[in-house]
């Protein structure tokens, strides 16, 4: 778990940012805390806050969140070989705590030869606790911080994932796949399709990976 402290620290930082942004949008603290406890999906939560602030219809909010979180299906499929031996109740428990960070760290752990699913559960639950702690901190100090983006914290999570990807690269094929995923996601984001950027990159690059590794 020692290698995961930068990710854990970033989660606390971004969770605090969410608490600040959500509080400044006019949502009540009960709604904000409930969102972090029940939804626990950073990108979706930021999207929900924006949609709520724009008075978007509830069906639109729900559909948007579900669409953004479709990438979790790909992540869950990737982790299935390591978790399939667990009872159904524990698999559902693991699914609730599945996030991009937990997936990335667990995948790196398994690729290095690790076999213990306790690594995933420990890391994923720690992320949940820190995210919710950060949310509460953000609610409390939101009025003092002002716009958190002026401090550059909106890039913190991006920097974290760049670091995770770099550490996970093992060979030339990994480099090609990582660069292609970045190009696809970046192009779609610049084109104004940031909502589907990660999903599309996640769907296209595994197909490329099959051919590259052959």
Image: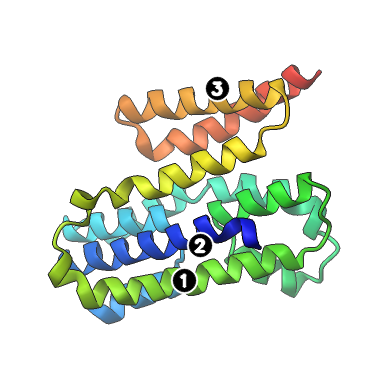
Q: Could you tell me how far apart the alpha carbons at marks 1 and 3 are, in whole angstroms?
A: 32 Å
Contact between marks 1 and 3 (CB within 8 A): the answer is no
Q: Is residue 162 above or below residue 177?
A: below
Question: In the depicted view, which residue is nearer to us: 68 or 214?
Answer: 214
The residue tagged with tag 2: helix, strand or loop? helix
Indicate which disc residue 8 carries: 2
Q: Position of residue 146 (x, y in %)?
A: 13, 62
The residue at 80%/55% (across/down) is: 82
Number of numbered labels in the structure image: 3
**N-terminal of the two: label 1 or label 3?**
1
Dot placed on the residue nearer the N-terminal end, 3 or 2: 2
Q: Residues within 10 Å of mark 1 (few under 14, many from 20)?
A: many
Question: What residue is shown with label 1?
Answer: 130
What is the x, y in percent for residue 46? 32, 56
Quadrant location of the N terminus in the rendered image: bottom right
The secondary element bearing badge 3 is classed as helix
Mark 2, Cα crowd under 10 Å, few <14 / some 14-19 / many 20+, is many
Q: Is residue 192 above or below residue 44?
A: above
Quadrant assignment for the C terminus: top right
Q: CA distance from mark 1 to mark 2?
A: 7 Å
Helix, strand or loop status at disc 1: helix
Q: Give the residue at mark 3.
A: 180
| Residue drawn at 74 percent across, 24 percent down | 210
User: Quick one: 135 or 210, which is closer to the camera?
Assistant: 135
Mark 3, Cα crowd under 10 Å, few <14 / some 14-19 / many 20+, is some
Cα gap from disc 3 to disc 2, whole angstroms: 27 Å
The answer to whether residue 27 of the structure is visible from this angle is no
Mark 1 and mark 2 lie on one chain; the one further toward the N terminus is 2
Determine whether label 1 and label 2 are within 8 Å by CB: yes
Residue 30 seen in this snapshot: yes
């Amino acid at each position: 778990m020692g290698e995961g402290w930068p990710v854990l620290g970033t989660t606390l930082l971004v969770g605090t940012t969410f608490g600040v942004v959500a509080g400044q949008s006019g949502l009540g603290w009960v709604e904000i805390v409930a969102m972090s406890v029940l939804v626990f999906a950073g990108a979706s939560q930021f999207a929900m806050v924006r949609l709520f602030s724009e008075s978007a219809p509830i069906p639109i909010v729900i559909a948007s969140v579900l669409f953004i979180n479709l990438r979790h299906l790909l992540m869950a499929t990737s982790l299935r070989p390591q978790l399939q031996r667990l009872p159904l109740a524990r698999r559902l428990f693991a699914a609730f705590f599945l996030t991009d960070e937990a997936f990335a760290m667990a995948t790196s752990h398994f690729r290095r030869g690790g076999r213990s699913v306790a690594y995933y559960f420990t890391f994923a639950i720690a992320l949940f606790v820190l995210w919710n702690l950060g949310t509460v901190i953000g609610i409390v100090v939101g009025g003092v911080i002002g716009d958190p983006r002026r401090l550059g914290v909106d890039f913190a999570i991006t920097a974290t994932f760049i670091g995770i990807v770099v550490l996970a690269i093992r060979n030339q094929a990994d480099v090609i796949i990582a660069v292609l995923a970045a190009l696809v996601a970046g192009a779609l984001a610049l084109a104004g399709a940031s909502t589907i950027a990660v999903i599309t990159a996640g769907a296209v690059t595994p197909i490329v990976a099959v051919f590259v590794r052959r």
